[in-house]
Image (cartoon, coloured by chain):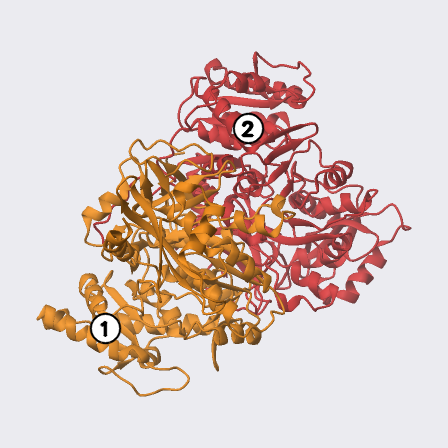
Chain colours: A red, B orange
Amino acid sequence: MDRLPKCGANYVPLTPLTFLKRAANVYSNRKSIIHGRVSFTWQQTYERCCRLASSLKSLDIVKNNVVSVLAPNIPAMYEMHFAVPMAGEVLNTINTRLDARNIATILNHSEAKVFFVDYQYVPLARDALRLLMTSNNIITLMPLVVVIDDIANPTGIRLGKLEYEHLVARGDPRYVPEEITDEWDPIALNYTSGTTSEPKGVVYSHRGAYLSTLSLILGWGMKTEPVYLWSLPMFHCNGWTFTWGVAARGGTNVCIRDTTAAEIYGSIASHKVTHMCCAPIVFNILLEADRRPLTTPVEILTGGAPPPAALLEKIESLGFHVVHAYGLTEATGPALVCEWQKKWDHLARGDQSRLKARQGISILTLADVDVKDPRTMESVTRDGKTMGEIVLRGSSIMKGYLKDANATSKAFHEKGWFMTGDVGVVHPDGYIEIKDRSKDVIISGGENISSVEVEAILYRHSAIVEAAVVAMPHPKWGESPCAFVTLRKTPAAVNEAEIIQHCRRNLPGFMVPKKVEFMEELPKTPTGKIQKFQLRALAILRRCRFI
Amino acid sequence: MDRLPKCGANYVPLTPLTFLKRAANVYSNRKSIIHGRVSFTWQQTYERCCRLASSLKSLDIVKNNVVSVLAPNIPAMYEMHFAVPMAGEVLNTINTRLDARNIATILNHSEAKVFFVDYQYVPLARDALRLLMTSNNIITLMPLVVVIDDIANPTGIRLGKLEYEHLVARGDPRYVPEEITDEWDPIALNYTSGTTSEPKGVVYSHRGAYLSTLSLILGWGMKTEPVYLWSLPMFHCNGWTFTWGVAARGGTNVCIRDTTAAEIYGSIASHKVTHMCCAPIVFNILLEADRRPLTTPVEILTGGAPPPAALLEKIESLGFHVVHAYGLTEATGPALVCEWQKKWDHLARGDQSRLKARQGISILTLADVDVKDPRTMESVTRDGKTMGEIVLRGSSIMKGYLKDANATSKAFHEKGWFMTGDVGVVHPDGYIEIKDRSKDVIISGGENISSVEVEAILYRHSAIVEAAVVAMPHPKWGESPCAFVTLRKTPAAVNEAEIIQHCRRNLPGFMVPKKVEFMEELPKTPTGKIQKFQLRALAILRRCRFI
């Protein structure tokens, strides 16, 4: 049995690139991409990717070089998810909400050889490149810049000589993609958003990307021929792997430049969208806009932050059907999905939303997920109360952090676990619920308080739009919860006492915020995540007033 | 990028064993198995598998030893799909329709160390062991026998001392499964049915079994919480991987001893079956029995032989919904699935059945499928007419044939393809249709005639139950088609001229059988496949009468 060797027929390295080739074969005339007036078929997308890959190969770069891109959800951004690895290179999608300094840091750290820039981001890219030049002083390290002009209405905006459609046009449609000989080879590089530390460069392998893609299709139950709306930026973990996943399912990518209510509702109506992903914050956009009634239900996969149960109820009442996932860049996007159980079908709406607001169970290709005491690495009791750190193990976990052996070895526990840094509990039914980032847990009089739990109660108050709870120093208890909230314009304003009263009705005493601060806006990372470290600093400063 | 090494957290060997562990964690109290009055939860199934695996380990056998089993679709058969590899051993399920000589050959060839036998098959197993003993003369090579008594109503039938439930009872529920350190390690050994040659031992790896399982769930679109009826023998390619797949989806296995209409309709009604697999021959069983109306649709995945379009129409009119797959033992079961396309929704029933009778497109984890001229290895034109050999490539293809380097190297083309020996065409939409086994193609006056195509026309005749068409020597054309048919008892008998007339109305002249032979029964393999080589011999013998 051991003498049966691997050969080209029975051992083919796993890579999401096979999804595109298969789509071109068996879904050849089906629409692959729709973007305004522009659309392509899978056969055309494959050919365009071959052309771009062959042009990239001619740019004097070698295997595993990094190709960066700064662009919204346009067709070029989608194509690059295949074309760049088809040329043997590594795709680095950059968050368009970063500033020039961040972008220069990423270009420098990744040693990007080519830098694709959407025409709208040319001023930002120019600033980043200037910063890179002055910090480097070595001309040869500057990436080659390629502008992606608007595909339907070219503007002529350039930054250097190269333009995306020119590269496509001059490429070879019969290009034979670089063979992936080792599925452990890198396919993508994604920088973390840095809620808790400096951005780190997370490297995905072909194997990891492939298995994550299959997992997530299965976890969400995405059937064939989805019409997938790109409301989630592709620069977030490669669109939670759905860049590759839509090809795997022979679906249609509806690409939109901006995540506005008008674009979303318009696309749903025009293209009969069936699926979309977004952070819970987008629910607010959808709820507060002029709504168009949905004629058929739209499946939403949400994640990035725990969606308050109340918000879930509201969005579902519009005809959206939400599945909740939890993940992180290091896990190639979602790692847990709150899989629906048939026996929940007959529960009351509120109970359903509470069950759904939990983070759920491991996706199929994760070998194991657990919640452990990080000191002993013992599993916590499955009582829905005992907190521990969520740990993951499996082939969808990143290869590691680029050029950061220290952070990599800290993230991987020697017993074979990836430490998420998130604190959670396991319910008796095996579903995991996140209680907090480990840095955000508030320890008051020896009791652990989950800031997320207090926030969930705050969100149930009709006047509150956003809420964040952090630890504030307390002379007696060590720490106590301090809430920062932003309020709806209408109804009439609410005061601190009323909010504290609302919490008191819904929480044990020790969890009730001792202080509520009203803000116009909460401080956020470029990806829209609340920066609690800033709020903690604020809480310390305000403390004098409190005691 | 290359300096990011694999570790226990980010590189976990792929194995279907993770599906059971996950099911025990997240579906712990959900029903895993129902068999008559007996039922288990996933937590219990996991514990029983741990117990059995630990008992197996204590039987003085070592890693990669073969454990054979001769049993119908009972709980033990299901559990062994996990317990045997959890002990580091290789599962060999034996077709219960084989005779003692075949079984002895398999036990000898596989060097089975343990042989599990369902109590009903004890006489057959005893005969096989006697043959093995006389052929061997070496006592140490005889496998240890374990009888699987009826779990609900123990009979006391034994063959030696060991009994399945005793092994389970004395095992350790806290057994830690043998760690799979290399996903290329063998997990199962399945002997081919031998339609064209001697049975060969096909070896699957953990990796191949894992990827095939995911593929088939995706290809069939099997959602979570299926209630899966075991109408397909688990000894066929490990139940087309659904032994592992039902665990992956947290489903319920409805185990039945016999594939009778009463058992099938009874189980559907009692347990709300949602999914089942079977060969098209089972459609006849379902159609000819006293039917009970289906209250909810039941999904059927069918394969093993091309289902005639007319038969598809009939079975779907009962409320079954059929998906058609094509595969072979060497591909870990189904390799192509006739994926439904939305644009077919509005076609006429007959057109739908014709589209569905095609074998379809590659499952997702196959890297590539093609139809090629086996001499030049050039792809055939996608015109639905040009025939070639179906070739496959990907990680769901077997490791090779056990102790048969010659057959293994013949099956794997040096250019990295597995040669199926099946002849097919590619339609313009990329869907593959099988025309024949390469040995069954009839070459008449230089024209290739697909015996399957002629058979499809014969099946459309209301008097015909089964039909097989083979080549008969012909003085002018080299070969000509000869049909063998069995007839329905009612309506009244039909004669040769009428059948030839029916073919003439529906086929080009050169494809019309020159001879029709009526038989009481067609010769078949133990798995129910028609043995055309016998019919070819018959055709040669009858030839004298014809010319």
Left or right for B310, reference A98: left
Q: Nearer the viewer, residue B514 or A463?
A: B514
Q: The N terminus of chain B appears in which quarter of the rendering?
A: top left
Front position among marks 1 and 2? 2
Q: Which residue is mark 1?
A: B59
Q: Nearer the viewer, residue B403 or A477?
A: B403
- Is residue B218 depicted above or below A53 in this figure? below
What residue do we see at 59% from left, 36% from top? A30
Say how many tags the image has.
2
Q: Secondary structure at mark 2?
A: helix
Residue B515: give x, y in percent of width and height: 35, 52
What residue do we see at 56% from left, 41% from top? A250
Residue A295: give x, y in percent of width and height: 76, 48
Q: Dot 2 surroundings within 10 Å: few (below 14), some, or many (20 or more)?
A: some
Q: Dot 1 surroundings within 10 Å: few (below 14), some, or many (20 or more)?
A: few
| Badge number at residue A44 | 2
Q: Residue furthest right?
A: A492
Q: Secondary structure at mark 1?
A: loop
| Badge number at residue A199 | none
Residue A78: give x, y in percent of width and height: 57, 32
Report if residue B161 is visible in the image.
yes
Mark 1–mark 2 distance (CA, rounded to whole Å): 59 Å
Q: Chain of mark 2?
A: A
Q: Disc 2 marks which amino acid?
A: Gln
Residue B218: give x, y in percent of width and height: 51, 52
Report if residue A370 is visible in the image.
no
Which of the 4 image quarters holds residue A149? Answer: top right
Q: Disc 1 marks which amino acid?
A: Leu
**Marks 1 and 2 on same chain:** no
Q: Residue furthest left?
A: B137
- Is residue A106 depicted above or below B40 in this figure? above
Which of the 4 image quarters holds residue A198? Answer: top right
